[in-house]
Amino acid sequence: MLKTYHVEGMTCMHCVHHVSVALKEVEGVKDVKVSLDQKTALVDAESTVMFEVLKAAVDEVGYVLSQK
């Protein structure tokens, strides 16, 4: 399942890296593409992966994930 989320708080490529790693570590996530310019995260994950789990992973590294 491919979904796009909005990411708040990113200002540089290090931020993109932190968000990417946090999302990729969630069980069931297959691939992640984070865009600094668009402030988005495109997440390819199994349908069983809950938004709350993705949000918590991103929150833990200091950013805010929201549904577009």
Image (cartoon, rainbow, N blue to C red):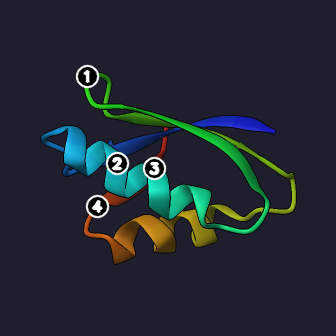
User: Hey, which quadrant is residue 61 in on the image?
Assistant: bottom left
Residue to which mark 4 is pinned: 63
Q: Are marks 1 and 2 in contact (CB under 8 Å)?
A: no
Residue to which mark 3 is pinned: 20
For the residue marked with disc 1, what is the amino acid?
Asp
Label 1 vs label 2, nearer the camera: 2
Mark 4–mark 1 distance (CA, rounded to whole Å)? 15 Å
Q: Earlier in the sequence, mark 3 or mark 1?
A: 3
Residue that protrudes farthest toward the right in the picture: 47
Q: SS at mark 1?
A: loop
**Coordinates of residue 38 in the picture (x, y in percent):** 32, 23
Q: Residue at x 48, y 71 (%)?
A: 57
Mark 3–mark 2 distance (CA, rounded to whole Å)? 5 Å
Q: Are marks 3 and 2 in contact (CB under 8 Å)?
A: yes
**Coordinates of residue 25 in the picture (x, y in percent):** 60, 66
**Coordinates of residue 64 in the picture (x, y in percent):** 33, 59
Q: Residue at x 54, y 58 (%)?
A: 23
The quarter of the rendered structure image containing the N terminus is: top right
The mark found on residue 53 in the picture is none
For the residue marked with disc 4, what is the amino acid?
Tyr
Q: Earlier in the sequence, mark 1 or mark 2?
A: 2
Residue to which mark 1 is pinned: 37
Vertical side of 11 occupied by 49: above or below:
below
Q: SS at mark 3?
A: helix
Q: Are marks 4 and 2 in contact (CB under 8 Å)?
A: no
